[in-house]
Image (spheres, coloured by chain):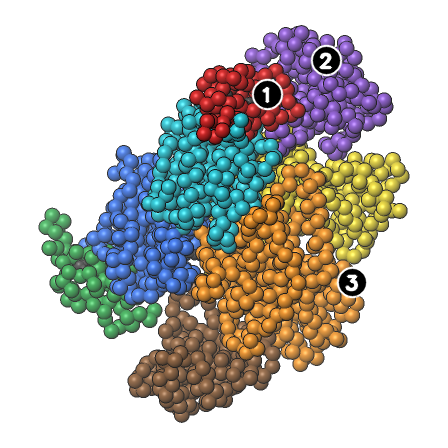
Chain colours: A cyan, B blue, C yellow, D orange, E purple, F brown, G green, H red
Amino acid sequence: MKKVFERPKSLTDVPFSYCPGCTHGIAHRLVAEVIDELGIQERTIGIAPVGCSVLCYDFFDVDMQEAAHGRAPAVATGIKRVHPDSIVFSYQGDGDLASIGTAEIVHAANRGEKITVIFINNAIYGMTGGQMAPTTLPGQKTTTSPYGRDTEACGYPIRISEMLSTLDGPAYIARASLHDPQNIVKAKSAIRKAFQAQVDGLGFSLVELLSTCPTNWGMTPVESLKWLEDNMIPRYPLGEYKVIEGVK
Amino acid sequence: MKKVFERPKSLTDVPFSYCPGCTHGIAHRLVAEVIDELGIQERTIGIAPVGCSVLCYDFFDVDMQEAAHGRAPAVATGIKRVHPDSIVFSYQGDGDLASIGTAEIVHAANRGEKITVIFINNAIYGMTGGQMAPTTLPGQKTTTSPYGRDTEACGYPIRISEMLSTLDGPAYIARASLHDPQNIVKAKSAIRKAFQAQVDGLGFSLVELLSTCPTNWGMTPVESLKWLEDNMIPRYPLGEYKVIEGVK
Amino acid sequence: MGEKILMKGAEALGEAAIKAGCRFFFGYPITPQNEVPEYMSKRLPKEGGVFLQAESEVAAINMVYGAAGAGARVMTSSSSPGISLKMEGISYIAGAKLPCVIVNIVRGGPGLGGIQPAQSDYFQATKGGGHGDYRMIVLAPSSVQEMVDLMGDAFDLADLYRMPTMILGDGMLGQMMEPVEFKERKPIALPPKDWATTGKKGRGKQNIINSLFLIAEECEEHNFELKKRYNEIEKNEVKFESYNMEDADVAIIAYGTTARIVKTAIKRAESKGMKVGLIRPITLWPFPEKVIAAAAEKVKAFLTVEMSTGQMVEDVRLAVNGQKPVYFYGRTGGMVPSPEEMVAEVEKILG
Amino acid sequence: MGEKILMKGAEALGEAAIKAGCRFFFGYPITPQNEVPEYMSKRLPKEGGVFLQAESEVAAINMVYGAAGAGARVMTSSSSPGISLKMEGISYIAGAKLPCVIVNIVRGGPGLGGIQPAQSDYFQATKGGGHGDYRMIVLAPSSVQEMVDLMGDAFDLADLYRMPTMILGDGMLGQMMEPVEFKERKPIALPPKDWATTGKKGRGKQNIINSLFLIAEECEEHNFELKKRYNEIEKNEVKFESYNMEDADVAIIAYGTTARIVKTAIKRAESKGMKVGLIRPITLWPFPEKVIAAAAEKVKAFLTVEMSTGQMVEDVRLAVNGQKPVYFYGRTGGMVPSPEEMVAEVEKILG
Amino acid sequence: MAQEIILAGFGGQGIMLAGKLLTYTGMLEGKNVTWLPSYGPEMRGGTANCTVIISDEEIGSPIVTNPSVALVFNNPSLEKFEPLVKTGGTLIVNTSLVTIKSKRTDINIINIPANDIAIELGEVKITNMVMMGAFVAATKAVSFEGVMDALKKTLPAHRQNLLPLNEKALKKGSELV
Amino acid sequence: MAQEIILAGFGGQGIMLAGKLLTYTGMLEGKNVTWLPSYGPEMRGGTANCTVIISDEEIGSPIVTNPSVALVFNNPSLEKFEPLVKTGGTLIVNTSLVTIKSKRTDINIINIPANDIAIELGEVKITNMVMMGAFVAATKAVSFEGVMDALKKTLPAHRQNLLPLNEKALKKGSELV
Amino acid sequence: MAKGRPVFNEDRCKGCQLCTTVCPVDIVHMSERINSRGYYTAEVTDPDKCITCMKCARICPDVVIEILREATKEEK
Amino acid sequence: MAKGRPVFNEDRCKGCQLCTTVCPVDIVHMSERINSRGYYTAEVTDPDKCITCMKCARICPDVVIEILREATKEEK
Ligand SMILES: Cc1ncc(C[n+]2csc(CCOP(=O)(O)OP(=O)(O)O)c2C)c(N)n1
Ligand SMILES: Cc1ncc(C[n+]2csc(CCOP(=O)(O)OP(=O)(O)O)c2C)c(N)n1
Ligand code: SF4
Ligand code: SF4
Ligand code: SF4
Ligand code: SF4
Ligand code: SF4
Ligand code: SF4
Ligand SMILES: [Mg+2]
Ligand SMILES: [Mg+2]
């Protein structure tokens, strides 16, 4: 018999540090598979964020830099400018990218920086124990919105893919979800397009992945998938938001 | 005879420090007129940016705070939360708002912070001697884009009004220009709507004003108006980008 | 009041702030101080106050600037990397003469470092990590109770001198529970905030909050005025604890959590026949340099113990000014010195 | 080479960096150092390098982090408030052991302050304005020529010790023109950057740039390793200039622009019969404490002159360690002390 | 006299709660007390432990390197803390889950099948109270009544009905010492 | 010997350029030199000035409180710098624009209608060279040839045709001293 | 069109010339006067022609210009 | 459907149960085994029924599962 599904080469052997059922792990696997399939492992440089995925430098078997909270796009810019032939990707959470790192992501996108951003939207700050993120849903209870997110005081959840798609720099922007196998397949194809866009030198690319945080949502992993589907997708419609000519 | 046009009460007597022909002065007058007309001078608190208008605390005859470069929306937030009945506005340049202050403006807008932002887009860093701004036009020469803005390396000029209009928080967003009397009248009406939206508690409001910088553009004031009209307006279309129900 | 309740340091800090009249909190999550914003998010709305999670530490400190300039009692809290991001804002707050309270629950550094307790932000806090000639009053509690007591002082001092005050703790103090009592504080006379931007409200003249002085002469004058204030504070506001110093041969200088451990060490040292005392700076700035200088006439040596590779020890050396040797023992990066290690250091000095 | 050309300090700085092999510059405009990025924006593209105006100082320093981690010689430049914003990033760079050069053309503070020359960021530069136990090598040129010469050192030292190096100047040095010569530097042996993230390129093992150490023991070990390196630097890399110290009664300690003015003052003092010398720290960290301690045995007193309300004076006091009185004279906020004022201070001391 | 106690197990076993209850009891009985949790990424790993000090004197270090008592709820905790218990100290082991045997002979080892007892009593969640019972009986650091008193004061109104069950667990635990 | 020179006027009068030329000349003549512009917001106000030091010795402070020579191109500059010139120093006044009269008697005052002369010569932009001519003649701080030499080296190829005009301006200025 | 006239607060004028480009009846021009701040000032050459359209005032960045208008009948 | 089977690297399993919810032929279930890291592990109860749809492998966040498939004719 032949292995038709196996651990991608671009993952190290180190077990993920994520909580049971956390879909960060799925996102990791997809990114690694795409790197394998595009044959770019030896020229890829990744950037770990500050967030639950801070340790992803231990998981991706490529050169990695750990960036300050929110600054991964700036770090990626520094790297890409030095090694324009390398493939540079950042992996960032929603606190990291949509909150503290807003300026950096907007400007990397606007510059059309030739990097790929994997954006994990789990509607919460996982790492620090479940505080409200800019992506937290209206009414959602978190440790810093104990009475539920009050849109009057904190506004509505921010839609990063939509916002960045108004800029000229991005070549490819899509939102996908990790809540079931079909969607995981679609997520992978979006990730692949994003990396391919970089390989082809087309511009900035970003894939927003709806992801779960069973620990801080206070649900089982299985319940979390359902919650994601029922609550996040209506607010964060899936699909491709920007696809410039040449993206394949 | 009766005065039908005079210096607004909400301006102090201090002469503006701007270069001859700089349209910052027009924007100042419009804001002051609106404050006068809405009868809110005694409860208005303004925030000066870092930029050529850094000294505007000397020009507006209302309580003022001078904010760190780019942070005016955060400062405004602090003030507004303490004095929810006051009318809080920030006055910011394009370096201030569209570059270093990107995160602050996006999140103030997204929170629907009940403040009004006057955003002076002059496609350049005036105060510091004419460096490239994120709003600088393709090919435009500045002291840090001596060979003209290279969109391949620096991206295209960012369109703030369009970008912020994708968010749920803003009640009113419009772009107007200060290059001739008709447009100045329109600009004033936009500013008035923006302040009125705040008075009515509707949410965040912003008016982007296309403005000149004769000194750093290296043109006469009169040439500058023409350059603005011919070059900026095509890139920055005028009009209202977001008007929620209730804005009048 | 008067009743003791068992509380986590970080939460006690929040409650103490509320009791001190703080109604505005702007912060951003970071371990190990998340319980502060979390507590505030629960309690402030019930007190008619505002808790707002800012988009970043930079935004948070600038919201504090705005709120302080608007006349409010306002606080923010963070931990090392987050505090570094606030440096520009803190310098602005100092420059604009605004009162506020900033909490730093220090963790191991540099960079992302770790999240275990440390004291390696001493220089940043006391010498001004931001640009320019400015100071913050820096208070270093060593128990949950003291954290509570100093919070009242922090707000009062900030208002009295119109400047930022920092509470410098560490992860251990923030995470531990101890019984605390919220004592009734006697209110002190504070100057009216007639400089605050509230809207002119018929005041006639504008109020302007500002730190810009384009004319060098004016900028210098402003700095000299600040400096005068700082000198006053150095004269009036020094706080420290002397423990077992009566006939000590070695004076240990330590603050915060470390100082508690020193007390345990002192008992062990005593049982081994060594005479060891503790001078515990409670205000790190102004630094209790007089009491240390005075002690230098009596003790044989000083030992500074810090959870850092050696920062406060410079202030100790400055105070001792060559009169007696000053030794240093430090653990860092989240490691906590044990009483045994301290005793061993004292033995080395005396041996 | 060998030929003297007349150049503005800021531009000479840029040219010297390029000559030192710097091909990447990330910065953000701020007065009074705009000529540095402006010069780089003109020159770097012609050298096959990259000039990029970042969206902010925070982004700039993190771009530097990325580029340094990728193995490049990279530089950023700013002035006081902008440098404060870089504090977190600098701490990360130090924590991740990355080499880079950071220029601070200091202006009056705190807050927005002014744009005239100042030296009030000394503490921030030398003690670590960011969090954690870290240091930067800090070089303080006092002429345009020295700015050029030190730039080569700055990059070499950064690479040699894998750490950030700062050039601390002030508006005057940045704005003034002087004749400079770009001397041929003899290359020193530098360790290969085999730790850089270049893509694995068949290397087999990953390279990781990182400052996170979740286990306190590891974080401490990392800090101790840094500390060891710092001790080495303190031993090997101190630079200073001694001027007229042979039989000086008063030693003035001053750096940068201030030190030039001191030289003028010394001549005037001499003409009034006073014997005054200058010790000019060229490295502010490591601080030339030995030479000052040695001088303490000969002079009657020290006078520290700074464009601040008194920062380096603490390091002078630490070095002198009580042996002789240490006086201070400072102007700040953009004011520059005149030779006359300095002479008057010396007269007070000797009188 | 000071008792320096470490409670260790994995998240969900009520370790932190039991520690707090003990601290609270000490406080009510007029002692000086501190409670210090481990925090940080090890939480993600699923382990949880806290240090409680109950003392007649001012408490110096809230950290304890060598506890006088350790309550270990699972194997990793035994591995970590068993070697650290002071000579003459006490190790209380939840033998329902801890399968490793301690080899120390210089300390007092108390084996309690706490989970089993709790399940027997009908509620696995009171495992921690069973262990507490053993602790109280073995050390007398606080009194049985003190613990019940503290429980009464801390249980919210709608949980007061759980008092008898908790009392049973405490008793049961103490009886096995 | 050191000459400490301030040139002051408003933007566009070629003040900075003249200062740089002077500095460059000094350098070519083997002297130590510094040039320091005023910078900052006063630029916005339209005034411009710079300090040039030409010295045989190492130059200490590049800032000058009391210049040995001041070249003032407009009224505000005269108001600002006339009182600061050292006793025995030289004040060179562009009387085409400066209408105020200096009242000092302890300094050497040289009046040059520089704009008028420049216009006469057909190019108002060489006003600064007229003033320079006066400066060279009055102070001998650098030589006439030195200035021309410096000009030759700094003017770009397509501007070398302006050399004769500049020479005329220099000469004219020097003749009026 | 209403009758009236613009009043220039000359000392505030910076001579930018913007006002001179917008007057529909072309009566705003640069003068030969230099004000106390050193700028050539704008002036209105034939005030009687002014139709009080306010364009000059609207475009002046330094709020130099006030417009007076004859009271209308009702106002009288 | 192709024949094959999933292989669980049990020591990496965290017992999250996600794999058990997606199997179209319902052969993935939780076992009673606890692995070295203290988690109950998932297992496949009737491997012969596996249609190698790979859903279980795709949703497993810890890359526990590999899928083997019988070589098709061409491959043989
Ligand atoms: C400057 C700074 N601020 C705050 C933190 C603390 N912090 C660590 S992770 C994190 C948020 C993580 O949330 P997110 O980016 O959504 O990632 P997730 O953990 O949810 O995957 C924060 C605020 C930090 N390390 N540095
Ligand atoms: C933190 C910080 N960075 C940079 C500066 C320098 N600075 C002052 S104004 C300015 C830009 C001004 O441009 P803009 O906001 O477009 O305003 P304008 O002058 O064009 O009206 C900059 C970069 C500063 N003061 N503080
Ligand atoms: S805390 Fe949430 S996001 Fe982080 S690893 Fe656990 S489940 Fe995943
Ligand atoms: S520099 Fe430009 S923006 Fe600034 S005042 Fe002058 S013309 Fe206006
Ligand atoms: S008001 Fe109108 S008509 Fe009158 S002067 Fe001004 S622009 Fe001309
Ligand atoms: S627009 Fe105003 S400032 Fe400009 S010339 Fe006319 S009156 Fe003067
Ligand atoms: S591969 Fe498909 S059929 Fe086979 S066990 Fe997994 S989910 Fe079930
Ligand atoms: S999805 Fe993976 S980790 Fe989760 S239970 Fe199944 S095999 Fe285990
Ligand atoms: Mg998240
Ligand atoms: Mg601008």
Circle 2 — which element?
loop
Element at label 3? loop
Measure the alpha-carbon separation of dots 1 and 3: 72 Å
Mark 1 secondary-structure assignment: strand
- Report which residue position mark 3 lands on: D323
The picture places residue G19, in percent across and down from the top left corner, at 23, 62
Q: Nearer the viewer, mark 1 or mark 3?
A: 1
Distance from disc 2 to disc 1, alpha carbons, whole Å, reads 25 Å
- Mark 2 or 3, which is nearer the eye? 2
Identify which residue, C134 or C161, lies in the foreground: C134
The answer to whether the residue labelled 2 contacts the one labelled 3, judged by CB atoms less than 8 Å apart, is: no
What residue is shown at x 29% (from left), y 40% (from top)? B242
Visible in this render: residue D340? Answer: no
Does residue A123 sit above or below C278 in this rendering?
A: above
The nearer-to-camera label among 2 and 1 is 1
The residue carrying pointer 2 sits among few (fewer than 14), some (14 to 19) or many (20 or more) residues within 10 Å by Cα, namely some
Mark 2 highlights which residue?
A: E113
- Chain letter for mark 2, please: E
C342 up-or-down from B176: above or below: above
Q: Are marks 2 and 3 on the same chain?
A: no
The kind of residue on which mark 3 rests is: Gln
Callout 2, which amino acid? Pro
Q: Residues within 10 Å of mark 1 (few under 14, many from 20)?
A: many
Disc sitting over residue H41 in the figure: 1
Count the marks. Answer: 3
Q: Is mark 1 within 8 Å of ligand 8?
A: yes
Residue at the (60%, 45%) spot, across then down = D204
Q: In x, y percent, where is residue D53?
A: 45, 56
Is residue F33 among the parts visible in the rendering? yes
Tag 1 near tag 3, CB within 8 Å: no
Which chain is home to disc 1?
H
